[in-house]
Amino acid sequence: MTQTPDDAAYNGAMRIHLLAFASASEAIGAPERDYRLPTEEGPPTVSDLKAALSEDFPQVKELWQRLAVSIDGEIVSDAEALHEGAEVALLPPVSGG
């Protein structure tokens, strides 16, 4: 579960595009990146993505309670399945007035 672009190393994997904002961007080291998830056990879910990101970027683990996740612009639950080429955003709480 890494984000390098060598397609030959990723048979049985799904590519998604991550967008990360504020503290999530700091935790994964970039505001956006392509990321791969294994698909051997079927389509990965948001929960699978969280586990993979927590393994690859341990700093993000402490943020999950405060982050919302969206797929293609729609906020989703941890049970939501991902799809090839999905745009997945890690969204911090919004404050304002």
Image: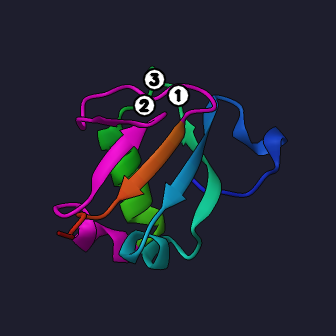
Residue 39: assigned label: 1
> For mark 3, what is the residue?
43
- 61 left or right of 15 in image: left
Q: How far from the left and from the top, in percent, is residue 1?
A: 56, 52
Residue 88 in magenta stretch: no
- 3 left or right of 60 in image: right
Q: How far from the left and from the top, in percent, is residue 25?
A: 48, 72
Figure label count: 3
- On screen, residue 11 above or below 59: above
Q: How far from the left and from the top, in percent, is residue 64?
A: 24, 61
Towards the viewer: 52 or 40: 52
Segment tinted magenta in the rendering: 58-86
Residue 86: assigned label: none
Tags 2 and 1 touching, CB below 8 Å: yes
Q: Which of the two labelled residues, at mark 2 and mark 1, occupies the earlier sequence position? A: 1
Callout 2, which amino acid? Pro
> For mark 2, what is the residue?
44
Quadrant the C terminus occupies: bottom left
Callout 3, which amino acid? Pro
- On screen, residue 96 above or below 14: below
Tags 3 and 2 touching, CB below 8 Å: yes
* Residue depicted at x 45% and y 50%: 89
Residue 69 in magenta stretch: yes
- Measured Cα–Cα span from mark 2 to mark 1: 6 Å
* Residue depicted at x 16% and y 61%: 65
- On screen, residue 65 above or below 46: below
10 Å crowding of disc 3: few (<14), some (14-19), many (20+): some
